[in-house]
Image (cartoon, rainbow, N blue to C red):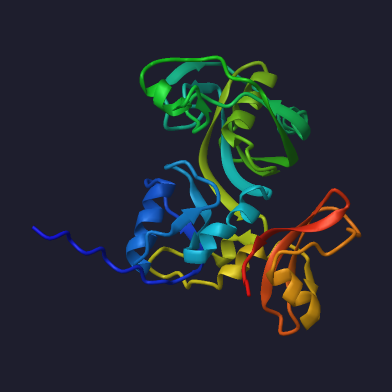
Amino acid sequence: MGRRSKRPDSGISGCAIVDKPAGCTSHDVVDQLRKKFGTKKVGHAGTLDPSATGVLVLGVGKGTKMLQFVTGTDKSYFGELVLGVETDSLDADGAVTATHEMSVTPDQVAAAAAKFVGDIEQIPPMVSAVKIDGKRLHELAREGKTVEREPRPVTVHRYDTSPTEDPLVYRIEVECSSGTYVRTLAADVGTALGGGAHLRNLRRTAVGQFLESEAASVEDLELLPHTQLLRGLPTLQVDDVVASQVRHGRSLGPAGGAGRLAVADESGEILAVYESRDGEFKAVKVLVAE
């Protein structure tokens, strides 16, 4: 029997900004885009919990190689803090583990949240995708296991709270570094107020410069150029001589500052991404080679 021929890849490349609905995983969205664009080369720049909604940035084709420049960017979230009830997952999907009689004022809640603004350390929740000894924490949690987790440094730029009609439910808006667990921030406020809390209705409103106003369903989205995944980087435009060097990944000489930048030719086409290393701008990824 002859071998079945592989389905040809479409060769499509781009950047997709999806408004992920509740009830599906981030990998489900990846699979949907694979079918939509006829390619296996689809990846995302950071997961959202199945119950969470909002901005999910994905790369298609060549775009998958550029997701690294989005993954570590800051994130923004909206959600609801529910005081008085703790769950094993720290959100509304988990089983209730404790309840508390709590009576607080909006000022007290705001003051408790303010304690977690700045550079802090968080212990990853057992329901997270962090790997320990080769196994994800949420897999261990499903087996009924709890293991020691090392705290991780994160930065919370903003943690605003506002009351609702329910005295134990507060709207929260959070801007934070990549890797921050908003559910942990919610639980921490409950503890700081002398009781407990959990998170519900989490929505991601921004990933770096990718905003919810741009996001669309998988059915309605328009694929953007894959270079859009570099939109957060400053761009350096160079002449034809330097462009030729960039296409070969050569150093651009002494760095005039820190960080990364996109390098474009005179026509505006982005050729590569460079970063400051050892006092020079060196190529991180060449996109257009000679």
Task: Pick whichever, 189 or 216, lies toward us.
Answer: 216
Q: Answer yes or no: is residue 265 visible.
A: yes
Identify which residue is drawn at 48% across, 60% down: 18
User: Residue 180: x percent and y percent?
Assistant: 64, 37
Does residue 17 sit above or below 115 in this rendering? below
Q: Quadrant of the C terminus?
A: bottom right
Residue that lies at the very extreme toward the bottom in this rendered image: 267
Task: Pick whichever, 72 or 65, lies toward us.
Answer: 65
User: Residue 140: x percent and y percent?
Assistant: 42, 21
User: Residue 284: x percent and y percent?
Assistant: 69, 56
Task: Pick whichever, 148 or 199, lies toward us.
Answer: 148
Identify which residue is drawn at 73% across, 69% down: 246
User: Residue 111: x percent and y percent?
Assistant: 77, 30
Q: Answer yes or no: is residue 108 visible.
A: no
Q: Quadrant of the N terminus?
A: bottom left
Give the number of marks.
0
Does residue 176 sit above or below 151 in this rendering? below
Does residue 75 sit above or below 145 in this rendering? below
Residue that lies at the very extreme toward the left in this rendered image: 1
Instruction: Left or right? Give the position of 276 relative to 166.
Output: right
